[in-house]
Amino acid sequence: MLVRGGFGRQVFVVLVHAVTAPRTSWRIMRTQEREGYIERLGTFVEEHRARLEELLRAYGPGSRSAEFGRYALIGQPETLVLLERMETAPFLLRSRWDEAFEAVLLADLEFDWEPRVRVSR
């Protein structure tokens, strides 16, 4: 799936930078987690395939919920990274997210995904 529009592209660029950033203060991934991340992300997708498909059906592009624009992240490829980070490093993700984006976007995604640990206000 291609990244659509300006907002999705902006999030994608920020996520790529956040994963590979030379400054550790900006990364959403610890250095020791970087090696083998693609494989772990693939495992995450396989383990959560049914949940991901349901999330996409309920809130993704073309859904009734998507008409209101608050679910702009759902259906974007970078959402897989966000959801994986939400499950493995929620506090790190939240702290970096709040530096760059509106909190409501991640809060909506967290509400719909229902991770083990919720950090939204």
Image (tube, rainbow, N blue to C red):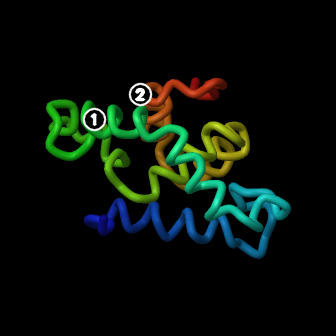
- The residue at the point 77 percent across, 67 percent down is 35
Residue type (three-letter) at the residue carrying disc 1: Tyr
Question: In the picture, residue 54 is in which quadrant?
Answer: top left
Q: Which mark is residue 34?
A: none
Q: Locate residue 56, reporting x and y percent.
A: 30, 40
Q: Locate residue 106, reporting x and y percent.
A: 49, 39
- For the residue pair 112 and 7, the one nearer the viewer reads as 112
Q: Mark 2 or mark 1: name the one nearer the start of the chain.
A: 1
Q: What distance separates the C-alpha of mark 2 from that of mark 1?
A: 8 Å
Question: In the picture, residue 14 is in which quadrant?
Answer: bottom right
Q: Which mark is residue 112?
A: 2
- The residue at the point 68 percent across, 44 percent down is 95
Circle 1 residue? 59
Above or below — where is 73 with respect to 47? below
10 Å crowding of disc 2: few (<14), some (14-19), many (20+): some
Secondary element at tag 2: helix
Q: Locate residue 44, reporting x and y percent.
A: 58, 46
Residue type (three-letter) at the residue carrying disc 2: Asp
- The residue at the point 42 percent across, 32 percent down is 51
Tag 2–tag 1 contact (CB < 8 Å): yes
Quadrant containing the N terminus is bottom left
Q: Locate residue 119, reporting x and y percent.
A: 64, 28
Image-based side of 94 in relation to 45, left or right: right
Secondary element at tag 1: helix
